[in-house]
């Protein structure tokens, strides 16, 4: 064995390497956000966020990306709502109605975990071909359905983790007082209220940032959609399209759009963090 | 009384229906993609499709090898960068770091996970691509536009940091204190303990984390598409452009209608992705669940 001196030196080197990797990984976040802030800020104007594209927008003339911002918000809000509508009962069902540890509960949770990992391009591809088969063209509704499918696993798994943290005693006590299982569920939900909002915000963030799923299903449009069957622009797609333009002004707008998306995501993250700390204090 | 029972009953039934519907998505994807890729599979054997390298849909040649190799290149590069960094960082977080540091770093890693893929792509174009073409490429005497599998790998590496770190830290936390104490009391340094006890004991969990990261990297579409160059060739070096499978689907879906078998080929690409990722995810989740039950 090497002498104690070399071994201690190795310990020191290893520790420094570990610290450096930690700094590199955490730093990459600041670096990415910083790059986008730095590049996007000079191009950010009030016009960008208050107007829809005017004639010649894509060759650098006036207009903004309000259509994409509103489109993304519609898409994000609607699919988060639908995902909650489906995901919340499923999570309750798996935790309260089904015996925990039963085959059904375990295999369903496993499947949701796996579904969570399925990339959005696969959802997009299958939804697109179903839409063609049914004769529906790319529209807000198509995008909403695709993104809902993508966010259901997030809602189910996050809420499931929350329900697991509640002591079983509470469930037993409520039930022994004569409550039905649905009434038990309502009591438990009260206890994880801040956590539920965290889960929904996570889902909203994923919905608003997704590209591959909406690329094929929601289409793109310069107008703010009024009905569900109209195509809708989304913020990530607007970034992607503007960035592929060779004209510097349009590219600059892509950076500014990226900046707007970054700010939306950061606001979501700060809210989730706040709610998560509330949930921790809420704990019984 | 009966009203309360009825409400309970209604909720139970509708929740069960929701569960069945949302899980049947798996079946829907598999059957749908399989059905749509049948025409291609009937016209050519699956081995030919997977091993031929000529992709010219107009002539009816659908060789997937360039795309498969593109995906493998970017994933492999991402792993080479990310695995050592994440292993070291999570060992530090689990073994050395104070609670305060942990509570500072882990939320930041979660923020990284919340950043949409397209922003990683923007960062790749603004930073990684120019660095590769202006500095790193010339340093090796290579002229390159920077849009290459190397750029894709770097961007992907950053994207899989969060999932690896969070799982690895969880896994390392489950290593019993007694094992570490035994090793330390025999005179091993902390690093020797980590290397020879903690990592060895945590091997299945680390493996699961890496497999999960691979499947994330396999399916990542837009960020990789933006920096990879998208030329259907088999990459021969780090600075060659590549064309990963998801990018193929995303780039060509709109225009596929007129060419025979083209849509079938793209659906086959989606099926391939789905099957591989489903398998990988399944494997690593089973390993992780087993670890969790043991702990």
Image (spheres, coloured by chain):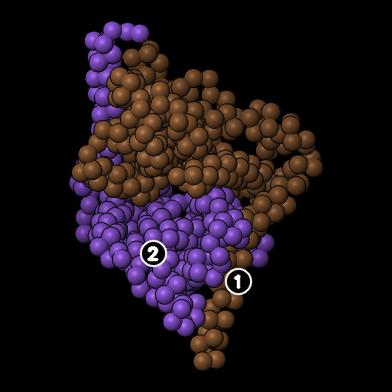
Q: Could you give the CA–CA distance between mark 2 and mark 1, rounded to whole angstroms? A: 25 Å
In the displayed structure image, the side of residue B63 where residue A91 appears, left or right? left
Q: Position of residue B197 (x, y in %)?
A: 40, 26
Which chain can be seen in purple?
A: A
What hue represents chain B?
A: brown
The residue lying at 35 percent from left, 67 percent from top is A192
Residues packed near mark 1 inside 10 Å, few (<14), some (14 to 19) or many (20 plus): some
**Based on the displayed image, in which of its 4 quarters is residue A130 positioned?**
bottom right
Helix, strand or loop status at disc 2 = loop
Foreground residue, A236 or B201?
A: B201
**Based on the displayed image, in which of its 4 quarters is residue B163 positioned?**
top left
Q: Where is residue A34 in the image (x, y as percent from the top left)?
A: 23, 41
Identify residue for label 1: B17
Q: Position of residue A95 (x, y in %)?
A: 50, 65
Q: Can residue A35 be seen in this view?
A: no
Identify residue for label 2: A166
Q: Quadrant of the N terminus of chain A?
A: top left
The dot on residue A99 is none
The residue lying at 25 percent from left, 62 percent from top is A281
Q: Position of residue B244 (x, y in %)?
A: 54, 35
Closer to the camera: disc 2 or disc 1? Answer: 2
Helix, strand or loop status at disc 1 = helix
In the displayed structure image, the side of residue B33 where residue A89 appears, left or right? left
The residue lying at 62 percent from left, 55 percent from top is B26
Foreground residue, A81 or B98?
A: B98
Report the chain holding disc 1: B
Foreground residue, A224 or B44?
A: B44
Q: Quadrant of the C terminus of chain A?
A: bottom left
> Do callouts 2 and 1 point to residues on the same chain?
no
Report the chain holding disc 2: A
Of all residues, the one furthest to the right in this rendering is B42
**Based on the displayed image, in which of its 4 quarters is residue B156 positioned?**
top left
């Amino acid at each position: 064995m090497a002498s104690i001196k070399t071994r201690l030196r190795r310990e020191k080197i290893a520790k420094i390497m570990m610290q450096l990797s930690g700094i590199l990984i955490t730093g990459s976040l600041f670096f990415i956000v910083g790059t986008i802030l730095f590049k996007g800020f000079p191009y950010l104007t009030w016009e960008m966020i208050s107007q829809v594209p005017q004639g010649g927008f894509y060759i650098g003339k006036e207009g903004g990306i309000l259509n994409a911002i509103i489109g993304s918000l519609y898409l994000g809000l609607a699919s988060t709502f639908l995902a909650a509508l489906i995901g919340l009962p499923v999570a309750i069902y798996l935790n309260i109605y089904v015996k925990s540890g039963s085959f059904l509960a375990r295999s369903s949770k496993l499947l949701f975990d796996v579904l969570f990992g399925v990339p959005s391009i696969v959802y997009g591809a299958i939804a697109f071909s179903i839409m063609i088969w049914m004769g529906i063209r790319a529209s807000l509704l198509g995008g909403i359905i695709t993104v809902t499918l993508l966010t259901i696993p997030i809602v189910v798994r996050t809420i499931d983790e929350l329900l697991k943290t509640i002591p079983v005693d509470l469930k037993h006590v409520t039930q022994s007082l004569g409550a039905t299982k649905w009434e038990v569920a309502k009591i438990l939900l009260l206890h994880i209220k801040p956590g539920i909002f965290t889960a929904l915000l996570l889902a909203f963030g994923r919905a608003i940032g997704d590209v591959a799923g909406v690329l094929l299903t929601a289409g793109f449009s310069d107008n703010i959609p009024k009905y569900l069957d109209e195509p809708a622009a989304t913020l990530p797609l607007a970034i992607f399209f503007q960035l592929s333009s060779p004209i510097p002004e349009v590219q600059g707008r892509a950076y500014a759009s990226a900046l707007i998306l970054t700010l939306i995501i950061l606001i979501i993250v700060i809210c989730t963090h706040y709610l998560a700390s509330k949930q921790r204090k809420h704990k019984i | 009384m009966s009203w309360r029972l009825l409400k309970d009953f209604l909720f139970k039934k509708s929740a069960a229906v929701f569960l069945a519907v949302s899980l049947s998505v798996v079946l829907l994807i598999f059957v749908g993609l399989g059905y749509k890729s049948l025409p291609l599979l009937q016209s050519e054997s699956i081995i030919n499709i997977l091993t031929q390298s000529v992709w010219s849909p107009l002539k009816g040649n659908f060789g997937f090898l360039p795309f498969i190799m593109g995906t493998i290149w970017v994933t492999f590069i991402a792993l080479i960068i990310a695995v050592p960094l994440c292993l070291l960082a999570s060992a530090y977080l689990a073994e050395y770091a104070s609670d305060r540091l942990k509570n500072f770093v882990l939320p930041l890693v979660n923020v990284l996970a919340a950043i949409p893929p397209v922003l990683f792509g923007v960062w790749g174009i603004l930073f990684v691509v120019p660095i590769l073409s202006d500095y790193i490429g010339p340093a090796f005497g290579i002229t390159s536009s920077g849009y290459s599998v190397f750029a894709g790998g770097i961007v992907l590496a950053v994207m899989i940091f969060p999932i690896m770190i969070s799982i690895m830290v969880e896994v390392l936390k489950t290593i019993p204190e007694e094992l570490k104490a035994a090793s330390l009391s025999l005179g091993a340094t902390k690093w020797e303990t980590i290397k020879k006890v903690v990592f060895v004991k945590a091997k299945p969990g680390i493996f699961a984390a890496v497999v999960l990261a691979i499947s994330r990297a396999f399916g990542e579409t837009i960020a990789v598409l933006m920096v990879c160059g998208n030329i259907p060739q088999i990459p021969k070096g780090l600075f060659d452009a590549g064309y990963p499978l998801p990018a193929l689907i995303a780039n060509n879906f709109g225009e596929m209608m007129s060419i025979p078998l083209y849509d079938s080929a793209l659906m086959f690409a989606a099926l391939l992705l789905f099957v591989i990722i489903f398998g990988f995810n399944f494997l690593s989740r089973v390993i992780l669940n087993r670890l969790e039950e043991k702990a």
